[in-house]
Image: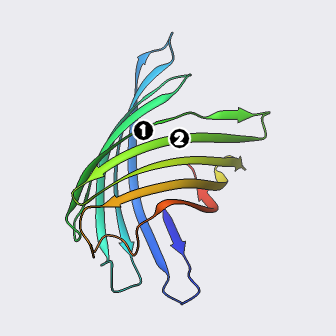
């Protein structure tokens, strides 16, 4: 996957990654599936505060018809941030037109913690091309001033984004 985040000052950021996942059926009758995932990504920060860094994470989710709990562990190599995150999410099919996915996540890393509330909407076109948009409410707390893992602290702020992605 790839994400380019253009800015008005020409200091574009981009994130490039590769992820793999495997689902294991726990109960066909109850529609329970255990999904294991692994991802490696590279952040090209475009600024001198946050260095370009590589992230790796592994996670597991218990997918079901009601609400999906998940947990993941992650490490940012060049910024030396190790942490875990846990959350809940649910997909809703809205009249067969698009999917809405609300989620909530809490994470705790070496020098910061965060919570994130998000709503995503998406629609798959032509079998694999997905158009999506997301809106998030973010709060994070830094334990060290001047850390090299963020340009600024997001303190109860709203952010949004969108784009297209290819689904396999």
Q: Quadrant of residue 52?
A: bottom left
Frontmost residue, 56 versus 50: 50
Q: Is residue 131 left or right of residue 117?
A: right
Front position in the image: 62 or 21: 62
Question: Percent position (x, y) of residue 74?
Answer: 28, 52
| Quarter location, residue 153 | bottom left
Q: Nearer the viewer, residue 36 or 147?
A: 147
Dot placed on the residue nearer the N-terminal end, 2 or 1: 1
Distance, label 2 to label 1, CA atoms, is 7 Å
- The residue sitting at the bottom extreme is 9
Which of the 4 image quarters holds residue 140? bottom left
Under circle 2, the secondary element is strand
Q: Give the mark count.
A: 2
Which residue is drawn at the image coordinates 19% and 65% (left, top)?
Answer: 80
- Residue 87's label in the rendered image is 1
**Residue 168 visible:** no
Q: Residue furthest top?
A: 29
Is there a contact, CB below 8 Å, between mark 2 and mark 1? yes
Q: Is residue 33 above or below residue 129?
A: above
Q: Residues within 10 Å of mark 1 (few under 14, many from 20)?
A: some
Residue drawn at the location 48% of the way across and 30% of the way down = 68
Question: With respect to residue 24, does 76 lie above or below?
Answer: below
Determine whether the residue tagged by mark 1 lies in a helix, strand or loop: strand
Rendered view: 119 above or below 165: above
**Residue, x 21% and y 57% (percent of image)?**
110
Pointer 2 residue = 103
Within 10 Å of disc 2 (Cα), the crowding (few <14, some 14-19, many 20+) is some
């Amino acid at each position: 996957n790839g994400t380019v985040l253009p800015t008005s000052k020409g200091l574009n950021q981009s994130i490039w990654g590769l992820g793999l996942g495997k689902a294991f059926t726990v109960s066909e009758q109850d529609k329970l599936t255990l999904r294991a995932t692994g991802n490696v990504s590279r952040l090209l920060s475009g600024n001198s505060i946050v260095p370009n860094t590589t992230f790796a994470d592994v996670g597991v989710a218990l997918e079901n018809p009601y609400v999906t709990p998940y947990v993941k562990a992650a490490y940012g190599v060049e910024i030396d941030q190790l942490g875990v995150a846990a959350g809940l999410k649910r997909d809703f099919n809205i009249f067969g037109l698009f999917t809405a996915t609300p989620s909530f996540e809490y994470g705790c890393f070496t020098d910061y913690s965060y919570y994130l509330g998000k709503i995503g909407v998406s629609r798959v076109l032509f079998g694999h091309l997905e158009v999506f948009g997301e809106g998030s409410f973010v709060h994070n707390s830094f334990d060290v001033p001047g850390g090299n893992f963020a340009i600024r602290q997001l303190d109860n702020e709203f952010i949004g984004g969108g784009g297209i992605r290819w689904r396999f």
